[in-house]
Image (spheres, helix red, strand yellow):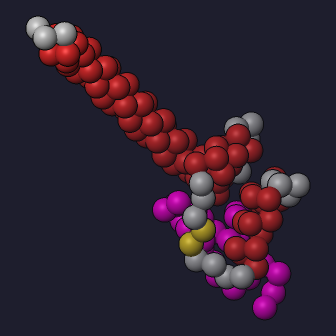
């Protein structure tokens, strides 16, 4: 097998990218574990590479200054995925806060009646 791999396309988080572009991206991240991961994916002819949200952010950051033509769409799509993830996380946090407030409210309402019951009220 050649060092460039034989696959022509790799899917990063649902975005199809030419293997040469993935290798170029790996080069931008060469001193990083993510760069090694992408390089191995091309070398091993992987068709799909899963990325954590932190890894997606690393790629967006690496492509921030100038994304080569084959990677500009990747930056756009990963940025959109990260935005949706942040929005979802904010909704989850708001729901958790509302549940916590409601639980405190219920506990406050229940507490006075239980105090009256113990005082013979």
Q: Is residue 9 above or below residue 95?
A: below
Q: Where is residue 68 in the image (x, y as percent from the top left)?
A: 71, 51
Instruction: Point out the stretch of residues depicted in magenta.
Output: 1-22
Residue 50 visible: yes
Quarter of the C terminus within the rendering = top left
Does the magenta portion include 19? yes
Compare residues 3 and 106 and report the one nearer the observer: 106
- In the shown orientation, is residue 16 left or right of residue 120? right
Q: In this view, does 77 lie above or below 36?
A: above
Q: Which of 101 and 26 is in front in this view?
A: 101
* Residue that lies at the very extreme toward the left in this rendered image: 121
Residue 64: quadrant of the picture: top right
Count of numbered labels shown in the rendering: 0
Q: What is the quadrant of the N terminus in the image?
A: bottom right
- Which of 77 and 115 lies nearest the eye of the viewer? 115
Q: Examine the structure image and report whether residue 120 is included in the region drawn in magenta.
A: no
Residue visible at 74% across and 36% down? Answer: 65
> Is residue 63 visible from the viewing direction of this image?
no
Expressed as whole percent of the image width and height from the top left, the position of residue 58 reads: 70, 46
Residue 113 horizontal side relative to residue 90, left or right: left
Task: Give the residue furthest to the front.
Answer: 120
Residue 51 percent location from the top left of the image: 60, 58
Outermost residue on the right side: it is 31
**Residue shown at 48%/35% (left/top)?**
86
Residue 3 image point, x, y percent: 82, 81
Question: Quadrant of the rendered structure where residue 35 is?
Answer: bottom right
Q: Nearer the viewer, residue 8 or 34?
A: 34
Q: Indicate whether 88 appears above or below 38.
A: above
**Along the horizontal axis of the image, is 115 left or right of 70?**
left
Residue at point 58% right, 77% down? 47
């Amino acid at each position: 097998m050649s060092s460039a791999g034989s696959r022509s396309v790799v899917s990063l988080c649902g975005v199809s990218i030419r293997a040469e572009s993935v290798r170029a991206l790996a080069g931008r991240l060469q001193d990083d574990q993510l760069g090694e991961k992408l390089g191995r994916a091309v070398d091993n002819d992987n068709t799909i590479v899963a990325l954590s949200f932190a890894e997606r952010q690393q790629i967006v950051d690496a492509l921030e200054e100038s994304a080569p033509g084959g990677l500009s769409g990747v930056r756009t799509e990963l940025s959109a995925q990260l935005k949706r993830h942040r929005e979802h996380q904010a909704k989850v946090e708001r729901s958790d806060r509302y549940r916590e407030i409601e639980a405190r409210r219920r506990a406050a309402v229940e507490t006075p009646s239980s105090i009256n019951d113990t005082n013979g009220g």
